[in-house]
Image: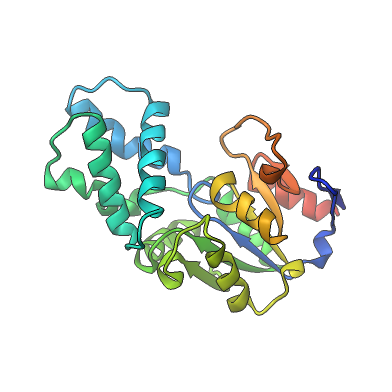
Amino acid sequence: MFFNVKHPPRVMNFKQFKLISFDCYGTLVDWKRSLADILNPFVTRHNIKITEDKLYELFLNADQKNITCDYKPYSDVLISVMEDIGKELKIDLKQAERTCLVDRFGDWTAFPDSSETLQELQENFKLAIISNVDDELFNVTKRCIGVRFDYIVTAKQVGSYKPSKNNFLRALEIFGLPKEQVLHVSQSVYHDIIPTNELGWHNVWVNRYSEPRRTDPVEIADLEVPDLATLAGKMRES
């Protein structure tokens, strides 16, 4: 059992769960490394001096801006993200640059522990994806994850993007389970931990990128782990 540091504390017993849901990009797929592989050559071609951290910041800001507007497919969001990055860097984008994040979506790669850990967890739990993506784009991504999920809930299906609670409420309907039997696992505090906290779900923060420890109760998950393999080990020992 693990005790939540939120107030009041909740007891989390892994044996209570029948299904584990995952965010995909950042949790199972290394979005930072994948973006760097695409965007570093882009800025180099334009003789732009910028750190990878600044590139990530530009991407996140543009992504957040575009998913909080009226719903549009994530492939269109990615094009808008590149247009916003181009404006910030004062680059007149070519058509291939506008669409590079979509065109190279198949190059996004999973973390080394994702596939093996998911296969282990699948022996005892149903597995689901709740992701801010199109069905078509996730069909490209799932090849590098190597696991057949029991449920896949995308932003396209719901018509909204996380952190909207609609995505999680719709997912729960699809799972056909009470929230007490679902554990949500994510790297993103903004998109996943905060809304699942508000909904009273049990959750795990996979701190893939060694971010500072959270102190605001609304941002604190029931459990923090550095990677999926650590989570599987804790579940194995419980």
Q: Nearer the viewer, residue 35 or 57?
A: 57
| Figure check: 23 above or below 210 | below
Q: Does any portion of residue 185 appear in the rendered image?
A: yes
Q: Nearer the viewer, residue 74 or 17?
A: 74
Please state the total of marks drawn on the protein image: 0
Q: Position of residue 19 (x, y in %)?
A: 69, 68
Q: Could you say which quadrant of the image residue 147 lies in?
A: bottom right
Identity of the residue drawn at 39% across and 66% down: 139
Identity of the residue drawn at 56% across and 35% down: 209
- Protein image colouring: rainbow
Q: Position of residue 188 (x, y in %)?
A: 56, 46
For the C terminus, the image quarter is: bottom right
Left or right position of 122 against 153: right
**Outermost residue toward the top in this view:** 49
Q: Position of residue 152 (x, y in %)?
A: 51, 70
Identity of the residue drawn at 33% across and 53% down: 105
Q: Could you say which quadrant of the image residue 117 lies in?
A: bottom right
| Figure check: 43 above or below 102 | above
Q: Does any portion of residue 124 appear in the rendered image?
A: no
Q: Position of residue 136 (x, y in %)?
A: 35, 67
Left or right position of 45 against 57: left
Identity of the residue drawn at 13% across and 47% down: 95
